[in-house]
Amino acid sequence: MHEDIETIVLTEAEIRARITELGDEISRDYGDEPILLVAVLRGAALFIADLARSISSPVEIDFMAVSSYGSSTKSSGVVRIIKDLDESLEGRHVLVVEDILDTGLTLKYLLKNLASRGPKTLEVITLLSKQGKQRVPISCKYIGFDVPDEFVVGYGLDYAERYRNLPYIGILKPAVYSE
Ligand code: 5GP
């Protein structure tokens, strides 16, 4: 275990097993219909890579990047699109791939934007869903895991751009924040 990690919340094996289940469920739901997986950079990059490989339906992937204002550990809900999608969403089955759903503010904004582009269907998969405080209602079709309302890192999730490469998801030691 990395020296900065206090507790492991989800092990590498747990994450892998759950993504296999989610891939099977998605493949059953969409069948032979092509899916456009849309990930929000950078946190969801690792998840979309593993998820795409667990789906047997035809899959295309695209990325967008948003920046949220405010401090690094709290979501402000105000987002700016830094990199837009390359693909048109018109008439397509779009599945937005998120790393973590906290307040839901980021996703709410994004979904409104994506819905205006005429997709045939628009659904959300999130690897983690936080037992949040002021969650705005988001209809999320697939959820990997419910996690406690604590700041987690690993498997794509960062603290100050670090720890994304941890193969598991964990909670940092408090001392790390004061360094
Ligand atoms: P929301 O708008 O749902 O509150 O926050 C969504 C974004 O905030 C996530 O996509 C992620 O980038 C960031 N975020 C929320 N909670 C966490 C967390 O526990 N750890 C990390 N590393 N990022 C988080």
Image (spheres, rainbow, N blue to C red):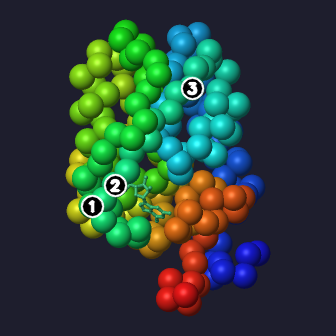
Residue 169 screen position, x and y as percent: 62, 64
Task: Determine the CA span between mark 2 and mark 3.
Answer: 23 Å
| Residue at the spot of label 2 | 68
Q: Amino acid at mark 3?
A: Ile
Which residue is painted at 57% across and 75% down in the image? 171
Q: Residues within 10 Å of mark 3 (few under 14, many from 20)?
A: some
> Is the CB of mark 2 within 8 Å of ligand 1?
yes
Q: Amino acid at mark 1?
A: Ser
Residue 138 visible? The answer is no
Q: Residues within 10 Å of mark 1 (few under 14, many from 20)?
A: some
| Residue at the spot of label 1 | 76
Q: Secondary structure at mark 3?
A: strand
Describe residue 41's horizontal placement relative to residue 113 as left or right: right
Mark 2 and mark 3 in contact? Answer it, CB < 8 Å.
Answer: no
| Residue at the spot of label 3 | 61
Q: Quadrant of the C terminus?
A: bottom right
Mark 3 and mark 1 in contact? Answer it, CB < 8 Å.
Answer: no
